Amino acid sequence: MKMRRRIPIAKSIPITIAKPIRILIFTSLFTVTALFAQEDVLYQVSTLDALVAGGYEGETTLAQLARHGDFGIGTFNSVDGEMLLLDGFFYRIDGAGKISLAGMDEKTPFAAVTSFEADQTVLADSSLDQEAFYRFADARLSSPNLFYAVKMHGTFRSVRTRSVPRQEKPYRPLTEIVKTQPVFEFENVQGVMAGFRCPAYVKGVNFTGYHLHFLAKAGAGGGHVLGFVTDRVTLEIDRTDEFHLKLPADSAFYHANLSSDRTADVRKVEK
């Protein structure tokens, strides 16, 4: 199957999202689906603490990651931008805020994916800031102790994002990198915000609470979400009952000091 070299953002990001495709299609550039991906399973590569500790290089390719889902977030080797997997397409939001499709042979040091099938869909047609929206979403969860994939699409009054530029060796700590991170502001923008809500007991393994990435309509930009105010959005929630963690098999992970509490560092990275 031949596919054009274009970024399918303009048609795929506004209000409606295509149904997940169940057949794996390999191309030299990207995949459009996942093969044999288990539903209601969150599959994760490495841990958040390992990333914060400087584990910026992994061995898992995007092609391998795509076998476990068509939806997710993460980053790329050398923390080369923010990753958002939507409908089987891997998008990169780079340090300049530009969006492109990532190649399937690229690798990731940290990512989480699932096969997205919404269990709930609800319209939020009033203005809600970030914390108010999280309370709105939390009220619809069956338990705070499960994992949830969340996706909202529609119009936002404002969105604030960031993206980390590609790093070169010797790598700086992530807490130092984010001090000079590019920050992007969007006003009255249509787009998709997607990611996960993880329970409190996985602190150090993943971000606890909500961790979202954003893509603006027509490829206008995006990144890791720092704050937002909704206008009229549709929220989709997919409850995830299983969690699978793939640990890195390399000397950097084996010798990393992961015994210390990195909560403060994670907050700096997230916010």
Image (tube, rainbow, N blue to C red):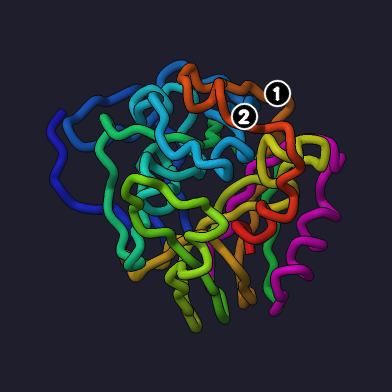
Report whether 52 appears left or right of 166.
right
Q: Is 14 in front, or is 104?
A: 104
Disc marking residue 42: 2
Residue at the (52%, 60%) spot, across then down: 176
Q: Nearer the viewer, residue 119 or 200?
A: 200
Secondary element under disc 1, as helix, strand or loop, is: strand
Label 2–label 1 contact, CB within 8 A? yes
Q: Which residue is mark 1?
A: 242
Question: Residue 203: horizontal and vertical position, in percent?
Answer: 76, 40
In the foreground, 159 or 79: 79
Badge 2: residue crowd in 10 Å (few <14, some 14–19, many ≥20): many
Name the kind of residue labelled 1 in the image: Glu
Left or right, 207 with reference to 222:
right
Q: Residue at position x 54%, y 73% from top?
A: 160
Classify 11 as above or below 54.
Answer: below
Side of 7 relative to 84 (left or right): left
Instruction: Give the alpha-carbon distance from disc 2 to disc 1, as whole Å.
Output: 6 Å
Residue at the spot x=45%, y=75% of the render?
184
Q: Which residues are magenta?
A: 127-154
Residue in the picture at 39% in, 42% down: 76
Q: Is residue 11 at all visible to an observer of this figure?
A: no
Q: Amino acid at mark 2?
A: Leu
Dot 2: element? strand
Q: With respect to residue 187, does 57 lie above or below?
A: above
Q: Is residue 87 above or below residue 124?
A: above
